[in-house]
Amino acid sequence: MPADNLIPDMTDAEFRDALAKVGDWMAGYRSRVGNMPVLSRAVPGQIEKALPQVAPVRGEPVEKWLKDLEQVILPAVTHWNHPGFMAYFGITASAPGILGEMVSSVLNVNGMLWKTSPALVELEQVVLRWLASAMGLPADWFGMITDTASTSTLVALAAAREAADLNVREDGLSSKPPLVLYCSQEAHSSVDKAGLVLGTGMQGIRHIPTDGEFRMNCDALREAIKNDIAQKRRPFAVVATVGTTSVTAVDPVQKISEVCREFGLWLHVDAAYAGTAAIAPEFRWALRGCDQADSLVTNPHKWLFTPIDCSVLFTRRPDQFRNAFCLVPEYLRTGAEGVVDLMDYSFQLGRRFRALKLWFVFRHFGTEGIAARIREHIRLAHELAGWIDSHPKLERLAPVNFSTVCFRVHPRGMDDEKDLERLNSGVIDKVNAAGEVFLSHTKVRGNYCIRVAIGNLQTSIERVRRAFDLICAAAEI
């Protein structure tokens, strides 16, 4: 006999009512987020102490969920959708992207195979061709959506390892020559982590020096490869970056591709941040040479107003991804022919319907609307850079290639780096404590600096000016 305490799902009427209540809360949050402190003021353990330590025995009404969301959760949220969020790289969740995420949840499909969700697989292929075309990339590249650039880079470098003809898939790394991976000193830490997972060890990751504009030095790259070959090591891939994390430098991809061809190495391009800038045609210079890459990652959840997570991995060599990952147990055999089974191109089996939210973003803004937003963010960054350059006690430490500005407070006569770090760290702390903007820091050639990244849809010139004024006030300059 069935248990007498079976709790049903919501009825259609209950769901519509709950959806209206949650929808009202969401819309209200979006309208008031700019008036909240952008950086959470929670202390460690605050949420754990405020919530019951065991789940409710009996179900509770949606009004109680929303009350706790408002009173317990919201005060401990750092608001990435806040117009004053200028730390790291922004991940604006635009309204169409949010709607796409909601539809994805209600459909609740798993696109591991074409058969398990033909719409997921085929829409993903279509919308990624839209993206490639908008960015000026080859239209025949194969694309797939992952969660983050960390996963995209790991998967791409696994394909690169397979392409090196070492038979690692069958034999493992035992008795193989030490693998070597190359990237610049400015490359993202996800490249190192991918190397660790793939068995290079830190000893097998070469961080190539950069030039005066923080770009990979191709002569140093070539010499490093020659040296490793002479030492009986096995170079297998180079990672070039378009928009490095600290200063948004753009590596000379065209020249790097020539080095890769010379030595038969896989070229992966990390364009997670700046790749989508190429949707504005005047910034396609940043992707010059990328058509020669074997794989490229860009993150719509960074600068394409798509809610996290949504990372796009393109490749001109999908066969190598299949060689690395295709493994089909009997229970996943379908007999379908002429289709794409996305599980064959990655270690991931389950796949969310992420293409919906990117599709909705394109449908709402159009490529012209997206390009206009990108141009505006870059304009705001250059306005900020101009104010910095005009101030006698501020010092810019890197070129402004896109919408990120790196600078520091540097009063005359204060040249000790430890003193300057304490000063600038204190400025950031004071500004962040005020709650109007959120700033982060980095180090540029060892020099601690303030880093302002503009990428939120709601960020205006007035908000940028306010951030500048708060910095000057905190520094007392």
Image (cartoon, rainbow, N blue to C red):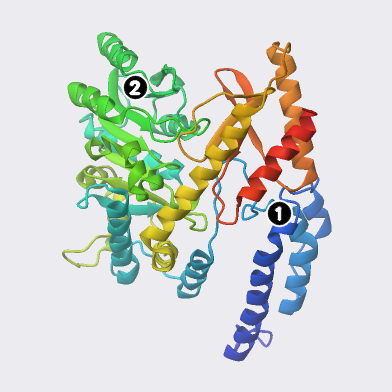
> Residue 205's x, y, as percent?
41, 22
Marks 2 and 1, the one that precedes in the sequence = 1
Q: Nearer the viewer, residue 282 or 134?
A: 282
Q: Quadrant of residue 359?
A: bottom left
Give above or below for 41 relative to 65: above
Q: Quadrant of residue 195?
A: top left
- The residue at the point 38 percent across, 54 percent down is 145
Amino acid type at image mark 2? Val
Image-based side of 289 in relation to 208, left or right: left
Image-based side of 259 in relation to 202, left or right: left
Q: Nearer the viewer, residue 28 or 15?
A: 28
Give above or below for 468 relative to 10: above
> Residue 16's x, y, as percent?
60, 85
Q: Nearer the viewer, residue 318 or 279?
A: 279
Element under label 1?
loop
- The residue at the point 42 percent across, 60 percent down is 369
Q: How would you rate the neighbour count of disc 1 (Cα within 10 Å): few for under 14, some for 14-19, many for 20 or more?
A: some
- The residue at the point 29 percent across, 50 percent down is 345
Give above or below for 100 relative to 205: below
* Residue designated by label 1: 77
Residue 354 circle label: none
The image quadrant where one finds the C terminus is top right
Amino acid type at image mark 1? Val
* Residue designated by label 2: 180
User: In front: mark 2 or mark 1?
Assistant: 1
Element under label 2?
strand
Q: CA distance from mark 2 to mark 1?
A: 41 Å
The image quadrant where one finds the N terminus is bottom right
One can see residue 300 in this view = yes
Give above or below for 65 relative to 344: below
> Residue 228's x, y, as percent?
30, 13
